[in-house]
Image: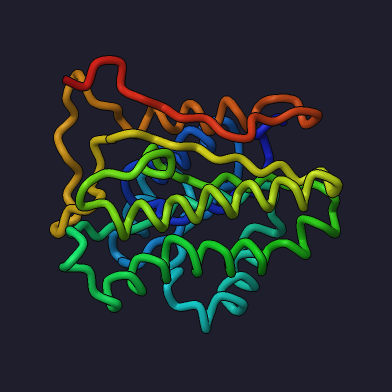
Amino acid sequence: MDLKGKKILVTGGSLGIGKATALMMVEKGATVLITGRNKERVEKAAQEIGAMAMVFDLADTDHIAENVAIVLKKLGGIDVLLNNAGIGEFGLLGDITLAGLQRVFNTNVFGLTMLTQALLPTFKEQQSGNIINIGSTAALKGFAHGSVYTASKFAVRALTQCWQAELRKDNIRVFLVNPSEVTTAFNQTDRVEKEVVDNKLRPEEIAHVIVQNLEMDNRGFVPEVSVWATNPF
């Protein structure tokens, strides 16, 4: 697919992977709308990269339908949905709370699902579309302290596989991208990006994989890809 002129929604686009990918898409000639929960941050990021901005909290599932109507009006349609927004919570079994589980799943699973479902009629009507879900290498293997976050990403992986089975007949490509550790503001309470280091992935590596997969001819797609640092030690 040629990204020039394509209409793209990137959730969680004010920082990290979302912002880097949105920038790369804009540079390819796409029309991009980024979303975020913080108005000042998302508008600043949009101005920096040449995208449109919208305040949109995925966890607020009661307003997804009306937010999607705004998205479609702003973009004039949609060709690509990048489900990038996500949060984490890390604690050992014994310290997990229902509130913590709900907080992570409301964004990472429930909000992601309801947003995608709200856009599905548009994709089906045009018999084309691209859905990229950002998973994690945590969707492949659990780890200590990872119960809540890992469970949410395993769920995203399962959702992706189900949607692939359901939507191929409609020419809708559904991709899963699993980054390992990336130097972003993820899980940083101050929302400040981590310092780039030589042996960790940058958001740009993940953006490259996303864009590369989208640019494959529409007759094919890569169902799942994981991205690891070459030598993270």
Name, please, the residue furthest toward the front. 94
Query: Would residue 185 be found to the left or right of residue 122 on screen?
Result: left
Q: In which quadrant of the rendered image does the C terminus lie? A: top left
What colouring method underlies this structural image?
rainbow
Q: Residue 161: image x %, image y %?
A: 64, 46
Query: Would residue 63 be found to the left or right of residue 182 on screen?
Result: right
Q: Is residue 211 above or below residue 116?
A: above
Image mark count? 0
Q: Is residue 33 above or below residue 199?
A: below
Query: Foreground: 143 or 47?
Result: 143
- Residue appearing at x 45%, y 69% in the figure: 58
- Residue appearing at x 40%, y 55% in the figure: 12
Q: Is residue 185 above or below residue 147?
A: above
Query: Foreground: 57 or 230?
Result: 230
- Residue appearing at x 86%, y 46% in the figure: 169
Q: In which quadrant of the rendered image does the N terminus lie? A: top right
Q: Residue 214: image x %, image y %?
A: 63, 32
Q: Residue 64: image x %, image y %?
A: 55, 75
Query: Would residue 165 be found to the left or right of residue 201 on screen?
Result: right
Picture quadrant where residue 19 is located? top left
Name, please, the residue furthest toward the bottom. 62
Q: Residue 207: image x %, image y %?
A: 45, 32
Query: Would residue 171 be found to the left or right of residue 51 on screen?
Result: right
Q: Is residue 210 above or below residue 44?
A: above
- Residue appearing at x 33%, y 55% in the figure: 149
Picture quadrant where residue 48 is located? top left
